[in-house]
Amino acid sequence: MSTLPGDRSDHDALGSMLRVNHAGEYGAARIYAGQMAILKDSSMSETIRHMAEQEEHHLAEFNRLIPEYKARPSALLPLWHVAGWALGAGTALLGKQAAMACTVAVETVIAEHYQEQLAALGEREPSLAATIAQFRAEELEHHDIGLEQGAELAPAYGLMSAVIKTGCRAAIAIAKRV
């Protein structure tokens, strides 16, 4: 993002950034909704609820920022709606550790993505950068919770993690444009 503030390409880059963040937080909220649907009566319910509430807050903030920056949301929100819930419920059906493996994989990619955005923003848009930095810290908290809850003990953890991370990176690339 080596443009001058106010340039059209700067606006496009910020719009893309907000679009992908909004889509990602929407997907994350749906992942936790899927996990809760399966694990609502488990020992993990309060932990998942805590993370879900933070993701809902992130989503609400990007819902506010999209029109403020005159950005457009992803046209693929219906896909993220279904895919997010299916990923959350599907991994939860494999057990608590698999649900947490999903959380660790997703949050790893999102934290990396937010760090890239912070580097790209530099000193520009300090309010947006502060929001992204706060959300990144909370995503890292979710990552750490997942590890503490035994994510790495999930069956086929390495494979599951690699597949989910690849899917997240693909979703980011797609949401930047669509």
Image (cartoon, grey):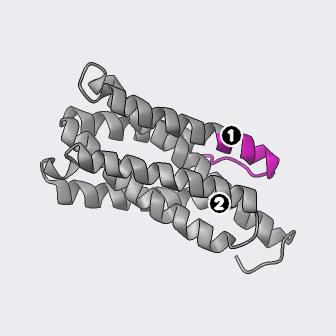
Which quadrant holds residue 12?
bottom right
Quadrant into which the N terminus falls: bottom right
Q: Residues in magenta? A: 61-76
Q: Is residue 174 visible?
A: yes
Decide if residue 147 is on the left or right side of residue 50. Answer: left
Query: Crowdedness of circle 2 by 10 Å Cα count: few (<14), some, many (20+)?
Result: some
Query: Crowdedness of circle 1 by 10 Å Cα count: few (<14), some, many (20+)?
Result: some
Quadrant into which the C terminus falls: bottom right
Residue in front for this viewpoint, 73 or 113? 113
Q: Which residue is denoted by mark 2 in the rendering?
A: 17
Three-letter amino acid code at the position of disc 2: Met
Residue in front for this viewpoint, 135 or 106? 135
Q: Which residue is denoted by mark 1 in the rendering?
A: 63
Q: What residue do we see at 41% from left, 29% from top?
A: 49
Three-letter amino acid code at the position of disc 1: Asn
Q: Residue furthest bottom?
A: 2
Report if residue 19 lies within the magenta region.
no
Q: Position of residue 68 (x, y in %)?
A: 81, 47
Decide if residue 150 is on the left or right side of residue 54. Answer: left
Q: Say which element carries label 1.
A: helix
Q: CA distance from mark 1 to mark 2?
A: 13 Å
Q: Position of residue 59 (x, y in %)?
A: 59, 40
Note whether 76 is above or below 4 in the view shown: above
Q: What residue do we see at 27% from left, 61% from top?
A: 162
Q: What residue do we see at 34% from left, 24% from top?
A: 37
Q: Position of residue 136 (x, y in %)?
A: 52, 55
Decide if residue 174 is on the left or right side of residue 96. Answer: right
Q: Say which element carries label 2.
A: helix
